[in-house]
Amino acid sequence: GESVGLHLPTLSVQEGDNSIINCAYSNSASDYFIWYKQESGKGPQFIIDIRSNMDKRQGQRVTVLLNKTVKHLSLQIAATQPGDSAVYFCADLPANTGNQFYFGTGTSLTVIP
Amino acid sequence: DVKVTQSSRYLVKRTGEKVFLECVQDMDHENMFWYRQDPGLGLRLIYFSYDVKMKEKGDIPEGYSVSREKKERFSLILESASTNQTSMYLCASSLGRDTYEQYFGPGTRLTVT
């Protein structure tokens, strides 16, 4: 079946540094990907998405990179701030599954002031 | 802003009880979803619904049922709660019509004793 994994369960970065969170997926038919942020006690919040016909997409302080060759996805956060501390997880949507996403287990990002 | 609300933030039930978790979205979204979130396992899809009175099984439907009598409301039912159903339950909705981004509620932390 489909599996989505994150490379590191925890990540600590200094405030102001850039953060990179990685994710691997197994289904080569996946054609849409999302990154979510989940703060303690809250539901996941959409950060950024990317379709399989792109390899990079930028938002405000965030960039998602997609490497379909190795089935790898990364989220880059520029100038990381204390408010960025949260669990981040990726999700992929294989083609022909309707709306059934597969979610990774999450990386807990801690920003050190 | 899309708002997805869940009826309870915390719930404690006894083994064998019937449990109802309610979810309401206010943006006329077509699709609604129920997930459970457990440490180290990520979000797993229990059931989803594309339309009123429509439902589809996700990856882990056993022990659960759902009801969608109105477009804005999606209920998750635990017919006879068991301790292994202790978890965080998250409801989500998406617009549908080739728009996949899912908006999540704050979650219900259910403990079955």
Image (cartoon, rainbow, N blue to C red):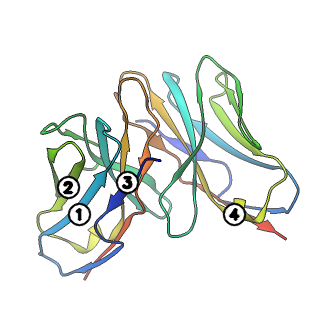
Marks 4 and 2, how far apart in space?
A: 32 Å
- Disc 3 or disc 1, which is closer to the eye? 3
Q: Is mark 2 on a helix, strand or loop?
A: strand
Marks 3 and 1, how far apart in space?
A: 13 Å
Report the residue marked by disc 3.
B4
Taking depth in this image into account, of B92 and B40 the one nearest to the observer is B92
Number of the label disc, if any, that sits on residue B21 = 1
Number of the label disc, if any, that sits on residue A85 = 4
Mark 2, chain letter? B
Q: Do callouts 1 and 4 mark residues in contact (Cβ within 8 Å)?
A: no
- Disc 3 or disc 4, which is closer to the eye? 3
Q: Of the two numbered discs 3 and 1 on the same chain, state the one appearing first in sequence.
A: 3
Q: In which quarter of the image is the C terminus of chain A?
A: bottom right
Report whether B33 appears left or right of A24: left
As displayed, is residue A70 above or below residue A16?
above
Whether marks 4 and 2 lie on the same chain: no
Report whether B106 appears left or right of A39: left
